[in-house]
Image: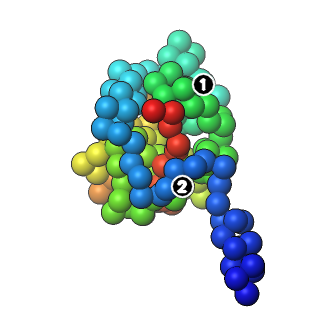
Amino acid sequence: MLLFALLLGACASTSDNLPSHQAYSPPTARKLTAYARSLIGTPYKYGGYSPKAGFDCSGFVDYVFRHSARVSLPHNSRLISRHGFSVKSGQLREGDLVFYDTNHSAYSHVGIYLGNHRFIHAPSSGGRVRTEDMRKTYWKRHYNGARRIALRE
């Protein structure tokens, strides 16, 4: 029975070695979110992955993590949702990733949690990188969960 429990636990783990309760150090989290905020106003571009080309949501998240924390993430929100560790909404910390169902598909949108119920993201066609309040009805209704990514500190 113990062996079975250990095997089940191994299936639930990920390759990132960061306990789900551990938040990024405040300086690292501030660096990551400050960098994300510096990109506010960048136009949305489907498939976009740079300030020059524009961003889609996953391109924005990957760009911020690569340039501020030296962590590469997939250019697909659903694949990003498989990285790191699950975080309960009451335990969100600056720099965590928040996921939404924005087109009738779970984990179809991702943003970066800023603290104080706010996140930053590349919204959709015609939009620009901006911040949002997670307490708004739309975002509450479409929330899928959050993940914390292991960072090199």
- Taking the spot 66% from the left edge, 65% from the top edge, the residue there is 12
The CA distance from mark 1 to mark 2 is: 26 Å
Q: Position of residue 8 (x, y in %)?
A: 71, 73
Q: Position of residue 5 (x, y in %)?
A: 69, 79
Single out the residue that lies furthest toward the left: 116
Image height of 111 relative to 153, above or below:
below
Relative to residue 98, is residue 90 drawn left or right?
A: left
Image height of 144 relative to 109, above or below:
below
> 78 and 87: which one is in front?
87
Q: Nearer the viewer, mark 1 or mark 2?
A: 2
Label placed on residue 85: 2
Amino acid under disc 2: Phe
Q: Position of residue 82 (x, y in %)?
A: 64, 52
| Residue 103 visible to an observer of this rendering | no
Disc 1 target residue: 48
Amino acid under disc 1: Gly
- Taking the spot 48% from the left edge, 28% from the top edge, the residue there is 69
Figure label count: 2
> 4 and 119: which one is in front?
4
